[in-house]
Image (cartoon, rainbow, N blue to C red):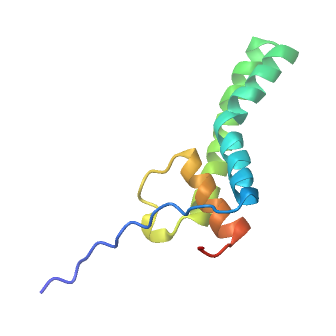
């Protein structure tokens, strides 16, 4: 008899309070757009040559931050699934910052 089974996928946590939704939105905005904002600012201040290397460096740094948040917040049994920035922000906010109970 084979005892292999697949665990059911937990849904992304639902955020109930306005504070938690705002925190999740800030994390999502940071993960999604900080690469482009830093690149445009460095292009404006220093030029396109430096902006190109800032783009590459910020892409690597935000990728590391994204993977750290993902590994901290998402359960180990579900880390094989792909999550977008909004999902990672919701998981991190619900599991590490807000810790609120379901209503």
Q: Residue at x 73, y 66 (%)?
A: 97
Q: From the viewer's perspective, tell me whether residue 8 is left or right of residue 42.
A: left
Q: Quadrant of the N terminus?
A: bottom left
Q: Compared to 15, does 27 lie above or below? A: above
Residue 61 is left or right of residue 6, and the answer is right
Left or right, 94 with respect to 97, comes to left
- Residue 22 showing in the rendered view: yes
Give 78 or 91, whichever is nearer the viewer.
Answer: 91
Residue 3 image-quadrant placement:
bottom left
Which image quarter is the C terminus in? bottom right
Q: Residue furthest front?
A: 103
In the picture as drawn, the residue positioned furthest to the left comes out as 1
Q: Is residue 65 left or right of residue 8?
A: right
Residue 85 horizontal/vertical position (percent) = 58, 46
Residue 18: image location, x then y, percent: 73, 56
* Residue 74 position within the rendered picture, expressed as x and y whole percent measured from the top left: 54, 64
The answer to which quarter of the image holds residue 92 is bottom right
Along the viewing direction, whichever of 72 and 24 lies nearer the viewer: 24
| Snapshot quadrant of residue 35 | top right
Residue at 68% of width from left, 33% of height from top? 33
Give the residue at x 62% y 44%: 63
Q: Nearer the viewer, residue 42 or 16?
A: 16
Whether 8 is drawn above or below 60: the answer is below
């Amino acid at each position: 008899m084979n005892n292999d089974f697949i665990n059911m996928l937990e849904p992304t946590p639902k955020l109930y309070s306005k504070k938690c939704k705002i925190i999740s939105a800030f994390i999502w905005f940071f993960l999604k757009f900080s690469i482009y904002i830093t690149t445009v600012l460095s292009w404006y201040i220093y030029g396109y040559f430096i902006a190109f290397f800032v783009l590459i460096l910020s892409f690597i740094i935000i990728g590391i931050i994204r993977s750290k948040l993902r590994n901290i917040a998402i359960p180990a049994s579900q880390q094989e699934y792909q999550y977008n920035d909004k999902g990672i922000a919701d998981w991190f906010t619900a599991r590490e910052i807000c810790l609120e109970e379901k209503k």
